[in-house]
Image: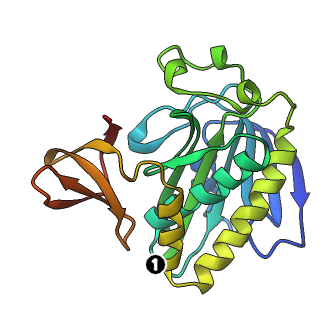
């Protein structure tokens, strides 16, 4: 784990004022957890050129070939909102992708997609250290990656910025823009009622209105993705017009 640089942007409010750049780590989220024992500033960003063992939701592997953008942000919110923060950070990710030419949307709960192909993913984890609550938000974006560098089973449902945009976008340029947007979002999160931010998220969520199957430890539900609850859960209306809240498990769009 070789640290190859440290960047400073004093004009940001909190997120990304300091960025530690690594050549390779096992996982930026796991590295962040290890570093929590130290007295780190809130908003510190850990950025790696490669991950040997990147992770997505539910322990799934996240392919991290060279060329992609992989980083984690360490936050200390007052409320234990790891789940909601993970949802909301999808909005700056989508804004950055659109800024650089990919008109992406949000697939519930944590994916940015373009034409139903995944281009970015988010993993948020709540962690206590010495009674202090931290949220670590890991973000992976398929930026300068050839599609054939991704695992064969992922290729049919994934895409990359390089594939969709003719102009080359440097990772440091993309990261700089994205951190500015996350910084603004986190400032709003700390000063705005959560319902307003959830409403903004709903407006960008392409899953709403689609027919989905949600599988949880209690079984499966199929119905229409109807709304986002104030707690961040997806409300699914089944064929009998009963509403169900989905938070944890797997979600598949079926129509």
> Which of 180 and 126 lies nearest the eye of the viewer?
180
> Which of 233 and 7 lies nearest the eye of the viewer?
233
Kindly identify the residue that appears in the image at 72 percent across and 33 percent down: 161
Kindly identify the residue that appears in the image at 51 percent across and 84 percent down: 193
Q: Is residue 85 above or below residue 130?
A: above
Q: Is residue 91 above or below residue 13?
A: above
Q: Is residue 187 above or below residue 103?
A: below
Q: Is residue 20 left or right of residue 127?
A: right
Q: Quadrant of the N terminus?
A: top right
Question: Which type of secondary structure does the marked residue at label 1 adopt?
Answer: helix
> Which of 99 and 22 lies nearest the eye of the viewer?
99
Kindly identify the residue that appears in the image at 89 percent across and 56 percent down: 7
Q: Dividing the picture into quarters, in which one does residue 142 lie? A: top right
Q: Is residue 156 left or right of residue 184?
A: left
Q: Is residue 205 left or right of residue 242?
A: right
Q: Residues within 10 Å of mark 1 (few under 14, many from 20)?
A: some
């Amino acid at each position: 784990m070789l640290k190859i640089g440290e960047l400073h942007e004093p004009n940001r409010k909190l997120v990304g004022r300091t960025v530690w750049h690594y050549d390779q780590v096992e996982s930026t989220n796991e590295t962040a957890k290890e570093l929590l024992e130290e007295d780190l500033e809130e908003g510190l960003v850990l950025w790696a050129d490669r991950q040997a063992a990147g992770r997505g939701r539910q322990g799934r592997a996240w392919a991290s070939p060279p060329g992609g953008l992989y980083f984690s942000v360490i936050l200390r919110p007052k409320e234990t909102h790891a789940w909601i923060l993970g949802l909301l950070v999808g909005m700056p990710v989508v804004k950055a992708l659109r800024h650089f030419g990919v008109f992406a949307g949000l697939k519930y709960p944590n994916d940015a997609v373009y034409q139903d192909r995944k281009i970015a993913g988010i993993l948020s984890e709540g962690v206590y250290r010495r009674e202090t609550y931290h949220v670590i938000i890991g973000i992976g974006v398929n930026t300068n990656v050839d599609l054939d560098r991704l695992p064969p089973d992922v290729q049919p449902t994934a895409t990359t910025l390089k594939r969709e945009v003719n102009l080359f976008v440097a990772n440091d340029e993309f990261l700089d823009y994205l951190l500015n947007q996350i910084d603004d979002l986190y400032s709003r999160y700390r000063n705005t009622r959560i319902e307003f931010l959830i409403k903004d998220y709903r407006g960008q969520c392409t899953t709403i209105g689609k027919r989905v199957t949600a599988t949880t430890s209690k079984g499966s539900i199929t119905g229409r993705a109807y709304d986002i609850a104030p707690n961040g859960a997806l409300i699914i209306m089944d064929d009998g017009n009963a509403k169900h809240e989905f938070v944890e498990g797997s979600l598949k769009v079926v129509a």
